[in-house]
Amino acid sequence: MENDVIKLRKLEPRDFNDVLEYMSDPITMTYFVEGIYNEERVNKFLNPDKEQEHFGIILKKENKVIGHIDLHDWFMKDTYEIGWMLNSNYFNQGYGFMAAKLVLDYAFNKLKAHRVIATCQPENIASKRICEKLGMRLEGLFKKCIYNQRDDNWWDELFFAILKDEYYEN
Ligand SMILES: CC(C)(COP(=O)(O)OP(=O)(O)OC[C@H]1O[C@@H](n2cnc3c(N)ncnc32)[C@H](O)[C@@H]1OP(=O)(O)O)[C@@H](O)C(=O)NCCC(=O)NCCS
């Protein structure tokens, strides 16, 4: 998957330094309850027991992994969850949407998905906006459904989805 600006491929152990750079960054990890990753966790993340589900986003002009998009099975047949994470030095330059769109196209055109879902906190404006720009429908707001140990607080969550028919209508 690629366009003129970015290329996506499965993350590999050789991406360690680039991935550590953003997964150890409190800004990038603000909305992840597991908090920032240290070297050991990144190592495990890049060497999973099952097949790799993380698509690294390579910025062509720097040949650098600036983030990744997750795409994994989500409970029901032909149903996937999509998620995104970027190095904060590269926020708000269009890369997140660009990468998410490439993976959404892959899910429907190559994997023949029936439905793709995504979730984010209501305060995560950029993530919510990516869902909207992908043509995803807001299906609900789950109140205080995620416990964040770091601030002993319950987070709300928005739930978005897009069906195959809706994808091809857009
Ligand atoms: C969410 C994330 C991937 C967005 O990627 P990005 O490359 O910064 O976003 P883009 O530049 O593609 O912008 C997408 C849209 O969000 C808007 N946006 C981006 N950053 C924004 C900000 N800080 N405030 C308001 N809007 C913002 C953009 O303007 C654009 O909308 P528009 O086309 O209507 O103008 C990135 O912010 C990130 O990695 N955040 C940390 C990890 C994270 O929270 N992941 C999601 C967990 S649910």
Image (cartoon, helix red, strand yellow):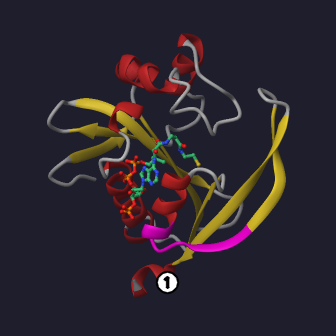
The amino acid type found where label 1 is placed reads: Glu
Label 1 sits on residue: 166
Question: Where in the figure is residue 1, as x and y percent of width and height?
Answer: 28, 53
* 19 lies above or below 4: above
Q: Nearer the viewer, residue 22 or 49?
A: 22
* Relative image position of residue 124 (x, y in whole percent): 58, 50
Horizontal side of 91 relative to 23 (left or right) equals: left
Does the magenta segment cover residue 134?
Answer: yes
User: In this rendering, would 22 be left or right of 160?
Assistant: left
Query: Farthest top residue?
Result: 39
Residue found 18% across the figure and 48% down from its top: 5
110 in the magenta segment: no
Please provide the residue range marked out in magenta: 132-140
Point out the image quarter for the C terminus.
Answer: bottom left
Q: Is mark 1 within 8 Å of ligand 1?
A: no
Disc 1 crowd rating (10 Å Cα; few below 14, some 14-19, many 20+) is few
